[in-house]
Image: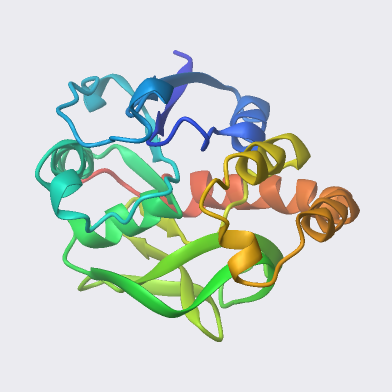
Amino acid sequence: MTRTVLFLRNDPLATEALLAEAFGEFGYDVDTFDVVTADRAHDPAGEVVFPDPRGYDVIVPLGARWPVYDPALRASWVGTEVQLVRDAAAAGIALLGVCFGGQLLAQAFGGTVERSTRPEIGWFDTASARPDIVPGGAWFQWHFDRWTLPPGAVELARTPDASQAFTLGRALALQFHPEVDVALLENWITGDDVGELAALGLNADDLRTRTTELADDVAPRIRTLVAGFLTHVAGQSRPS
């Protein structure tokens, strides 16, 4: 049977981009679910009816511009999504969280998420203890929050200011954005209506140039990351 990965688009600006291509290369069908649609982006709280996680082999909660600990979101769809990933884990379904999605996994399984002392936006060198799962090197970041590890989690990668990856059972959480390509970055730059880049003294053209320069380097590392996730994380035995 064909395996299927479900990407949860928690924010209409945060799509699966290069990750969908990588999963496709490994024989996965790709499904998507829009958690917050474009017409709700400026008022994202609200109830959401998610798909049944048991219909998928892998679930990937993606990024979002809001804090995962926002009270209104936790009382609505974030709380529901937290229960979804807990149910998925209990059913043996593999999980790959990206940025907000990684923070959601941390929060769901007993870690915490809080405002970071130093936001990370741009390309940051990342040190990895398991390059067969999370290759080291430059990865793209756009986040203001960071997690503490859930009980039993194993940290795989970090920058000086934040943990960047952990595993817990058949789940892998990433703080960085492996999915980013030039087109996705352009959507984020265009959608930066609160001036985050300018406030941090960052130049959008510099980010565009660096993303283009690193494209050939990042592409094989994304494939290694997905292969490592499928082999060493999703490939573990399902709980009985």
Residue 185: quadrant of the picture? top right
Residue 88: quadrant of the picture? top left
Q: Is residue 185 left or right of residue 70?
A: right
Residue 201: quadrant of the picture? bottom right
Q: Is residue 201 left or right of residue 148?
A: right
Q: Position of residue 46 (x, y in %)?
A: 17, 30
Give the total number of marks visible in the rendering.
Answer: 0
Q: Position of residue 179 (x, y in %)?
A: 62, 43
The N terminus: image quadrant: top left
Closer-to-camera residue (90/13): 13
Q: Is residue 135 left or right of residue 114?
A: right
Give me the residue at 62% from left, 50% from top: 178
Give me the residue at 51% from left, 20% from top: 30
Look at the picture and state if 38 lies above or below 93. above
Look at the picture and state if 238 lies above or below 214. above
Look at the picture and state if 189 lies above or below 140. above
Closer-to-camera residue (142/42): 42
Is there any visible trace of residue 51 in the rendered image? yes
Q: Position of residue 202 (x, y in %)?
A: 71, 67
Is there any visible trace of residue 141 in the rendered image? no
Residue sitting at the far bottom: 160
Give me the residue at 61% from left, 52% from top: 225
Give me the residue at 68% from left, 28% from top: 25
